[in-house]
Image (cartoon, coloured by chain):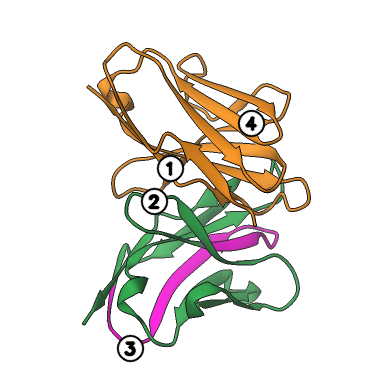
Amino acid sequence: GAVVSQHPSRVICKSGTSVKIECRSLDFQATTMFWYRQFPKKSLMLMATSNEGSKATYEQGVEKDKFLINHASLTLSTLTVTSAHPEDSSFYICSAASETGQETQYFGPGTRLLVL
Amino acid sequence: AQSVTQLGSHVSVSEGALVLLRCNYSSSVPPYLFWYVQYPNQGLQLLLKYTTGATLVKGINGFEAEFKKSETSFHLTKPSAHMSDAAEYFCAVNFGAGGFKTIFGAGTRLFVKA
C-alpha cells in the first residue's frame, strides 16, 4: 500500500515552454501533497504544500506564478512549471500524506526535468 | 529553531560490517522521526519511522533505529552491510504542526566496499 506515482519520469523541453508534472496516490486518498525540488547531491527542498480543494502554500522564495500547483482531487496533484528556463532543470519529487496518517509522507519516484 | 542534523555526509563501510548513520534533531518537543533511502534517480523510500511507543524501531532491509529523547537522536543501524545498501539516506523529522511539514537532513551517502 501507500504507492505514489509521478508522470512523466523525465522530460526535456525548450526554454519558454510549460511543463506539467502529475502526482497520484494510487491506493489511498491524499489530503495533503508536497512538492520538493532536489539539486544534485543535495537534500530535498520543500517548494509547496497542497491540500485538496484549496490553494497551495508556497515556501519562502518559491515563485507561485512560476510553479503552479493544483490539487483537484484526493488522488491527484499537478505541478506546472511555466515558461521554463534552464535554471529550472532539476529533479522534482512529490509526496503524499493520507488523512489517517498525516505525519508520514510517501514519495513518488521523481521527475527529471531538463530545460534546453 | 527546529532542525535535523546528519553527522557525516559520507560513510564508508566494508560489506558485512556494522552500519551506523547518525541523526540528531533540535526541538523542545519530541517529533515524529523518519529514515528514508534514495537510490540514484529515484524517489525516497520509507525505511522506518517513530511516532509513539517503543523507542527501538525496526524497518525494512534489516535496518533499525532507536529514539533517544535524552540525546535528541535517532541513529540508524544495520548489523551487517550489504552491497545493495549503498545509497543516500535521509533522516527527517515532523513536528506535527504547520500541515505536518517534514524537515529533512542533508543526507548521508553510504558506500559499501567489497
Label 3 lies in what chain?
Answer: B
Q: Amino acid at mark 2?
A: Gln
Q: Is residue A69 above or below residue A90?
A: above
Q: Which residue is mark 1?
A: A110
Chain letter of disc 4?
A
Disc 2 + disc 1, Cβ < 8 Å: yes
**Element marked by disc 4:** strand
Q: Which residue is mark 4?
A: A50
- Residue plotted at (56% across, 44% down): A95
How far apart are labels 4 and 1 at the CA level?
Answer: 17 Å
Q: Which residue is mark 2?
A: B42
Q: Which mark is residue B16?
A: 3
Give the number of the mark in front: 1 or 3: 1
Residue lying at 32% horizontally and 62% vertically, measured from the top left: B9
Q: Which residues are magenta?
A: B12-35
Mark 3 and mark 2: Cα distance apart in space: 25 Å
